[in-house]
Image: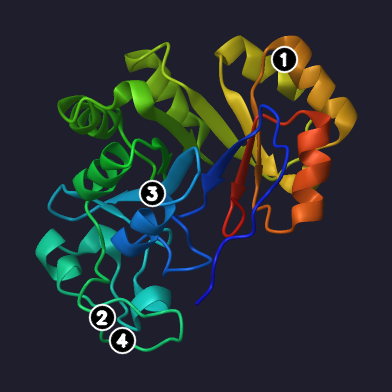
Amino acid sequence: MANTIKLENKGHTLVIAHRGMSGIEPENTNAAFIAAGNRTLYGIESDVHKTADGKYVMMHDANTLRMSGDDIEIGKATYETLRNIRLKEKNGKRGRTDLRIPSLEEYLGICKYYEKQAILELKDDFTAEDVDEICCIVEDMEYMEHTMFISFKINNLLLLKARCPKQPAQYLVEQPIDDAFIQEMADKNIGIDARQDLFTEEIMQKCRAKGVETNAWTVNKPEDARKLMDWGIDYITTNILE
């Protein structure tokens, strides 16, 4: 059975399980979240979409085809329809009854049970009402103090900050990180969650000087993690490292 690769001497760097422990179990499933919960990781990252009937479910893609073989668009399907889908195992077969699309509440419940930070990626172009609903769910579960929000869509994070100014948030980027961008994120009190190759030691130093947290994805090789940790990165997001 697959297992994690242990990292030594991590310093202050915190390690986050990407879509759960997705190197071991199918991504964004309760099985992947539990696998992460049972390991010495700081947090569990997952992606949230809204269904046609206003529920929130955890999946990376906007469509279920890759993970299940069923071609269903999440935003046009009901929660019940999505819950009846069986997801593929790592070998591509279907059959395990535990591999279903989780609800936001299930994901948060697992994070809370295992005392892991929830790293919640806002995938859709959410409205202020949507962001408020998501925050209310997290608040009702008494887990806002242990949740960080991330998104490729800056407006999602601005809506979050308008509602919860002090809530931790990181902007997911695949663009070069320059001085102006670092300053913009510092002004907005938003961290930088970037593809690992976009970071350099100099960029890391500039982010630290401005008080901007840094997170690299998706770091799966120990040698890449070691370099980033030596540079002083705050977080590493990974499929298989621990």
Picture layout, residue 180 above or below residue 200:
above
* Residue at left offset 50%, top offset 43%: 41
Residue 15 appears left or right of 86: right
In this rendering, the label closer to the viewer, 2 or 4 = 2
Q: Which SS class for mark 2?
A: loop
- Label 2, label 4: how many angstroms apart (C-alpha)? 6 Å
In this rendering, the label closer to the viewer, 2 or 3 = 3
Check disc 4 and report the residue beneath it.
Answer: 94
Q: Amino acid at mark 3?
A: Gly
* Residue at left offset 38%, top offset 80%: 89
Picture layout, residue 34 above or below residue 195:
below
In this rendering, the label closer to the viewer, 1 or 2 = 2
- Label 4, label 3: how many angstroms apart (C-alpha)? 24 Å
Residue 217 can be seen in this image: yes
Q: Residue 101 placed where, x, y %? A: 26, 64
Check disc 3 and report the residue beneath it.
Answer: 37
- Label 2, label 3: how many angstroms apart (C-alpha)? 20 Å
Residue 179 can be seen in this image: no
Q: Residue furthest right?
A: 202
Check disc 2 and report the residue beneath it.
Answer: 96
Question: Upstream in the sequence, badge 4 or badge 3?
Answer: 3
Question: Upstream in the sequence, badge 1 or badge 2?
Answer: 2
Check disc 1 and report the residue beneath it.
Answer: 183
Question: Upstream in the sequence, badge 2 or badge 3?
Answer: 3
Q: Residue 191 placed where, x, y %? A: 60, 25
In this rendering, the label closer to the viewer, 1 or 4 = 4
* Residue at left offset 29%, top offset 31%: 131
